[in-house]
Amino acid sequence: MRLACVVHRYGTDFAGGSEAHCRHIAERLAASHDVTVLTTCAKDHITWRNEYPAGEATLNRVRVIRFSVARQRSLHRFHDISEIAFSGTASVADQEEWFRENGPLTPGLVDYLRDHGRDFDRVLFWAFRYAEVYFGLPRVADRAILVPTAEDDPLIRMDIVGPFLDKAAGYVFLTPEEQGLVERRLSVAPPPSCVIGSGLAPAGPPRVGALEGLGVRAPYLLYLGRIDPNKGCETLLHHFVRYAREHDDGLQLVMAGPVNMPIPDHPRVTRLGFVDEGVRDALLAEAAMLVVPSRFESLSLVLLEAWNHGLAAVVNGHCSVLKGQAHRANAALTYHNYDEFARVVEYLLANPAEAKQLGRQGLDYVNREYRWPTVMAKVERLLRDVGTGTGLSTLNP
């Protein structure tokens, strides 16, 4: 098949999220299909500033076409339109303006789908909240497969989202919770779909000396990913600083990932910034436990990565997706407030045998559900199941 993959950013610079998910799927599809990635010239998801050159290139044997972003994001305008769009009384025009301000606004990519969409048998779109997906998918609706990465947040409840979701010819979901969330917004019979999460290769031994000179000392609680209030990091830091004040067990909080918020200068908090895969694997191999504090997730890939290393985790119990992952794997403990956070962290630290057992159960779960051959077999079946119709829908960007 001739396949297109549409995503807001694409490259090897992005360790997680829908960008990495798209790249991993695209590279594996390219082994047996003709795959083209359609994306933007942006590296930074805050500004959408053009940094990659526009035009065609090849990355890991995958053809990539990049389109310029028409304008950088104004956080002031985005804040203002968000208040209007999520008020419950916003007009259709105001709600569509939210997608334009969220960006990346890439008219060249949308026009390419209009003009060349029929050149592809299937077009896969990652992350419905971004402008190139919202405005681009209706151009190729009869062959569009959406990987929505939907979360139970105000966006999924906007009036215009339901009619948009109705347009997809197929879906790739990351968890059963996400599937239920999206299908409740549909006004049509659910189209063909699959639930795949994300594939993982078996974890190898950590790189010798990968953590030397980084200030990491055992035991440590590990956070991996974007350090951002929207990911629950502000609350996590409040919880941990209080925990450190009340417990003299020496537990360190190690945070690795791009930083989008202030981090307190605390002797038991270590900030590493973006780390390469070797350091990432070593952090997962040596941690006492992983913490995932987000309230909004469509899938926690880092949670799967932790289980791939046999590592137990503590997760935010307010997030139905995290609770579902923890329940299915029986490999994580949940918390809802500081007292519960302190209790589960203290318990796992004081009971390493029980923590190791949770980690083993997580690894068993990953082996059953998330090895790449299992994941890609589901994707291949979906590609065959999604039919193509006649006519393409339109929506003005």
Image: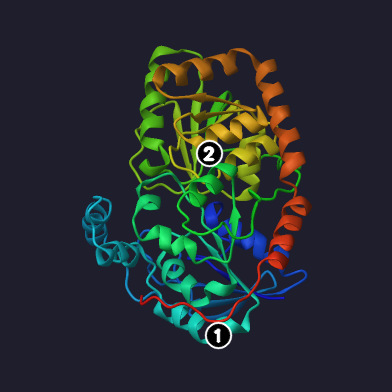
Q: Residues within 10 Å of mark 2 (few under 14, many from 20)?
A: many
Please identify the quarter of the rendering in which residue 125 is found: bottom right
Question: Residue at 23% across / 57% down in the picture?
Answer: 90
In the displayed structure image, the side of residue 143 where residue 207 appears, left or right: right
Which label sits on residue 321?
2
Q: Quadrant of the C terminus?
A: bottom left
The secondary structure type at the circle numbered 2 is: helix
In the rendered view, tell whether residue 267 sits above or below residue 179.
above
Q: Is residue 195 visible?
A: yes
Q: Nearer the viewer, residue 121 or 211?
A: 121
Q: Nearer the viewer, residue 166 or 52?
A: 166
Amino acid at circle 2: Val
Pointer 1 or 2: first along the chain: 1
Mark 1 and mark 2 in contact? Answer it, CB < 8 Å.
Answer: no
Amino acid at circle 1: His
Task: Give the image location of residue 91, x and y in percent.
Answer: 24, 62
Mark 1 to mark 2: distance in Å? 36 Å
The secondary structure type at the circle numbered 1 is: helix
Question: Residue at 36% across / 41% down in the picture?
Answer: 229
Residue matched to label 1 = 116
In the rendered view, tell whether residue 161 sits above or below residue 5.
above
